[in-house]
Amino acid sequence: MIIKRMNELKRIQLMNNIKDKQMKKIYTILLSSLMLFACSTEGIDDNGGLDNNAPSIPSLLFPTNNLICSNIDLEFEWDSSIDDQGDIISYQIEIALNAAFTNIVYSASTSQPTRSFNLEKGTTYFWRVKAMDNQQNESVYSEVRTFVTEPEAGFNTIPQIPAIVSPDLGSVTNDNIVALQWESNDADGDPLVYDVYFGETNPPALLAEDIDQNAFGVDVLPNKRYYWRVVAKDNQQGVAIGRVWYFETN
């Protein structure tokens, strides 16, 4: 009887061991499945695709706010947007006759952070830009800026578009300080002041305003390419926008 009882206890213990092993196996399978699910769903959006953020909002560069433009064939410029996923970026620019953009007169898409339009004279315009990637994600529109084009008939002659003097276009310099020099004149004899745009990006950013001389010194670093442009302004609100020039340093 005792031996039979001992055999019965061994059988029960064996069955318990088998059950424990089975439960551990089931637990391991469930835990692995949960971990796999957690890993496989990380970064998944509601539509089952990988998360993709919209590009950054463009920052407007030119024309500056409240500018009076003598040129009606005007090149609009803004900073390039950044896309965290490295997607291809394009831009949508809108130009309207009112700040609410219910009267849009020009609209275009471009892959570059610039776009030229042939505008009407004597008109107040409002403009804005948004960025889009090739995954159909869009930023919100930038701030809105306004400017005015010079009237058709007027007593004031606009200044001459600034011409480069030094450094030569595309030249290379070893200097740490470079004197930017240009020339312009006004047929009416109006006094001129200048805005200087300068930097490592194209288009360059505004560096100095209302300079009353035809030269401006800038600090530079070696092994760089620098871009610059000059805008000439008379005291009758006439404006002439120069082209972008560049030079390089050793």
Image (cartoon, helix red, strand yellow):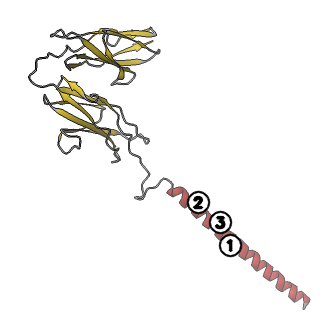
Q: Mark number for residue 35?
A: 2
What is the spatial separation of the Cα atoms under label 3 and label 1, in whole angstroms?
Answer: 9 Å
Quadrant of the rendering where the N terminus is positioned: bottom right
Crowd rating for badge 2 (residues with CA inside 10 Å; few <14, some 14–19, many 20+): few
Q: Nearer the viewer, residue 152 or 197?
A: 152
As shown in the figure, which amino acid type bears the numbered disc 1?
A: Met
Is 54 drawn above or below residue 23 in the view shown?
above
Q: Nearer the viewer, residue 72 or 174?
A: 72
As shown in the figure, which amino acid type bears the numbered disc 3?
A: Thr
Residue at the right extreme, as displayed? 2
Look at the numbered disc 3 and give the secondary structure of its residue.
Answer: helix
Q: Earlier in the sequence, mark 3 or mark 1?
A: 1
Q: Position of residue 16 (x, y in %)?
A: 76, 78
Look at the numbered disc 2 and give the secondary structure of its residue.
Answer: helix
Quadrant of the rendering where the C terminus is positioned: top left
Q: Is residue 199 left or right of residue 43?
A: left
Q: Earlier in the sequence, mark 1 or mark 2?
A: 1
Tell me whether circle 3 and circle 1 mark residues in contact (CB < 8 Å).
Answer: no
Foreground tag (2 vs 3): 2
Residue at the front extreme, as displayed? 235
As shown in the figure, which amino acid type bears the numbered disc 2?
A: Met
Tell me whether circle 1 and circle 2 mark residues in contact (CB < 8 Å).
Answer: no
Q: Nearer the viewer, residue 136 or 20?
A: 136
Foreground tag (1 vs 2): 2
Residue located beneath label 3 in the image: 28
Look at the numbered disc 1 and give the secondary structure of its residue.
Answer: helix
Q: Nearer the viewer, residue 99 or 139?
A: 99
Residue located beneath label 1 in the image: 23
